[in-house]
Image (tube, rainbow, N blue to C red):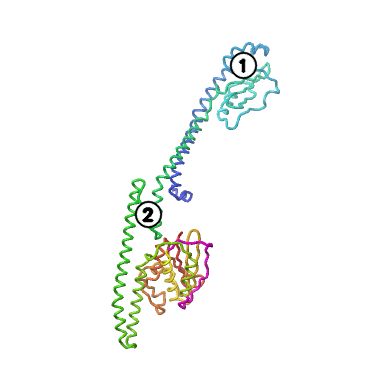
Amino acid sequence: MTFRWLKHYMPRSLYARAAIIIVVPVIAVQIVVSVVFLQRHLEDVTTQMTLTAVREIELIMGQVAGTETQAQVQARLRPALDALQVSLRFVNDGDVPSDDLRPWYDYTGRQVEHVLRSRVQDVIAVELPDTRVVRLYLGSALGPVELIFDRRRMSPAAPHQLIVTMVAFGLLMTVIAFLYMRNQLRPVKRLADAAQAFGRGHTVPYYPSGAIEVRAAGSAFLDMRARIERQIEQRTLMLSGVSHDLRTPLTRLKLGLAMIDEEDAAPMLQDVAEMQQMLDAFLDFSRGVSESTPEKVDPVALLKQVVEDARRADRNVALVACEVPEGDTVTLRPTAIRRAVENLIANAVRYGTRVEVSLAVTPKFLRIRVEDDGPGIPADKRAEAVKPFQRLDASRNQNQGGGVGLGLAIVADIARAHGGALRLGDSERLGGLCADIVIGR
């Protein structure tokens, strides 16, 4: 037997699941105790008390049956009625109710009514107007008889006290448990927020707190975050150092080639230019998102500036759509996002003739889309295309321009640093590649 179907109806948050773990047992215990108390205890006690009153009723009605007049009944039974604290009087037929009377919420009254009707003969009606008195109407040879008993002689007084007390204390302990649980879950939530922020490229202050297990997880997260930051810093320093060191011999080569005949030096100058382009790509990849800090930016203005710069460079680029709520801003690293969009545009221009850029912002995500009319990338090679130093010569026209295979890798790295992803697909508008930078908010 499996309960997988139940997962679709269960809450996702830890707080809600913990609340269910607390509330469900409390409710189940209260229901079980209430049912057992009502059926096994309250009903039995009420039945025994009512049976005792039934014997008194039989005694009284026996005396009524052996008397000739109503006055004689009153005189004969007065001492017994005073001792039993029972009121007896004869009533007219018109004063006798036609049906029983009992409030819907009177649980013990139902049991009293059942016992009286099953054990006492000539019962005309039973009235239980409240929890204080019981009016019993009986038929006799002298006319209808009304007997008034104290309700406490037939059922326990205030039988709901146990249930009310149990529910009240259950609610009180549940509230206390909720407050304690919330205090215990707060460190877990802080750890989750810190991890989520780090996954989106933000470093927020965090210190371990809470239970021992939560503190251990928090300390492990801090160690992991420190190692990742050191690794990123070391990678950046290594690539930047190598790239900067290689600029010196490249500069000497340019100076040396300047002294040679232009026709003979042209092929070598082209090789030096390609090496310079590779170094620039290495530097862009090593810098990643380290050059800027997250800040509130207007994504529309940022994209308009990038597209305008590309058009000034004689590129056929257009900003076709901006679905953004008025005045909405997004927390981004503007320099890194600008570099990512520029790389996508350069990649699209290299392999196509027309590029369209669009923007969509919702309360949950931001999406920057770059489409071209080039050959695109086959679906089975898109995962490989975003890896560093991967060049898909079979799917992209190498004669239209070269690279070192870092363009899409840089974009994917920047998207991951913002807590998002780079998604590649087919453009429905232009027929080429469709590249989406999707970042959660």
Give the mark toward the camera: 2 or 1.
2
Height in image: 147 above or below 17?
above
Q: Residue at x 33, y 84 (%)?
A: 267
| Residue 76 in the figure: left or right of residue 359 | right
Residue range corresponding to the magenta coloring: 311-332
Q: Position of residue 357 (x, y in %)?
A: 49, 70
Element assignment for label 2: loop
* Secondary structure found at label 1: helix
Name the residue located 62 percent from the left edge and 25 percent from the top edge: 127
**How crowded is the residue under tag 1: few (<14 C-alpha within 10 Å), some, or many (20+)?**
some
Q: Residue at x 52, y 68 (%)?
A: 321
Which residue is denoted by mark 2 in the rendering? 205
324 magenta-colored: yes
The quadrant holding residue 243 is: bottom left
Give the image location of residue 178, x and y in percent: 44, 42
Instruction: Using the rendered image of the protein, determine whether residue 50 is visible from the camera's viewpoint.
Output: no
Q: Amino acid at mark 2?
A: Pro
Q: Is residue 376 visible?
A: yes
Q: Which comes before the other along the chain, label 2 or label 1?
A: 1
What numbered label is drawn on residue 61? 1
> Which amino acid type is shown beneath numbered disc 1?
Met
Q: Nearer the viewer, residue 263 or 259?
A: 259
The image quarter containing residue 313 is bottom left
